């Protein structure tokens, strides 16, 4: 993984509750990972939904209907 110049600032703002995540604060890697799984990163969901780890695109779309 490439070094992120904004890592510490990103970690402060990261709302992901999955603590052992190796991508925490490296937003480009997080987005790439979740997109490859057919998901969106936890930071685009409200806290209550993020904690369920249902990060599906369908869940996101249903939030905005």
Image (spheres, rainbow, N blue to C red):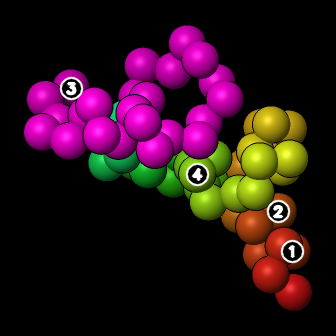
Question: Alpha-carbon neighbours of circle 1 within 10 Å: few (<14), some, or many (≥20)?
Answer: few
Q: Is residue 39 magenta?
A: no
Q: Residue drawn at (21%, 26%), measured in percent from left and top?
A: 1
Q: Is residue 39 visible?
A: yes
Horizontally, residue 10 falls left or right of residue 48, namely: left
Q: Which residue is mark 2?
A: 59
CA separation, marks 2 and 4?
A: 13 Å
Q: Which residue is mark 3?
A: 1
> Looking at the figure, which quarter contains the C terminus?
bottom right
> Helix, strand, or loop for circle 4?
helix
Magenta residue span = 1-24
* Nearer mark to the viewer, of 4 and 3: 4
Q: Nearer the viewer, mark 1 or mark 4?
A: 4
Q: CA distance from mark 1 to mark 4?
A: 16 Å
| Residue for badge 4 | 43
Residue at x 77%, y 75% (from the top left corner): 61
Query: What is the CA distance from the residue labelled 4 to the residue labelled 3?
Result: 20 Å
- Would you name the residue on which mark 1 appears? 62
Residue extending farthest to the bottom is 65
Task: Residue 62: give x, y in percent of width and height.
Answer: 86, 74
Residue 53, compared with residue 32, is above or below; it is: above
């Amino acid at each position: 993984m490439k070094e992120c110049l904004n890592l510490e600032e990103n970690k402060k703002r990261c709302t992901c509750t999955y603590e052992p995540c190796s991508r925490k604060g490296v937003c480009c890697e997080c987005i790439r990972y979740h997109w490859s799984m057919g998901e969106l990163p936890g930071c685009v969901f409200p806290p209550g939904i993020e904690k369920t780890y249902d990060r599906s695109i369908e869940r996101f779309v249903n939030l905005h209907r």
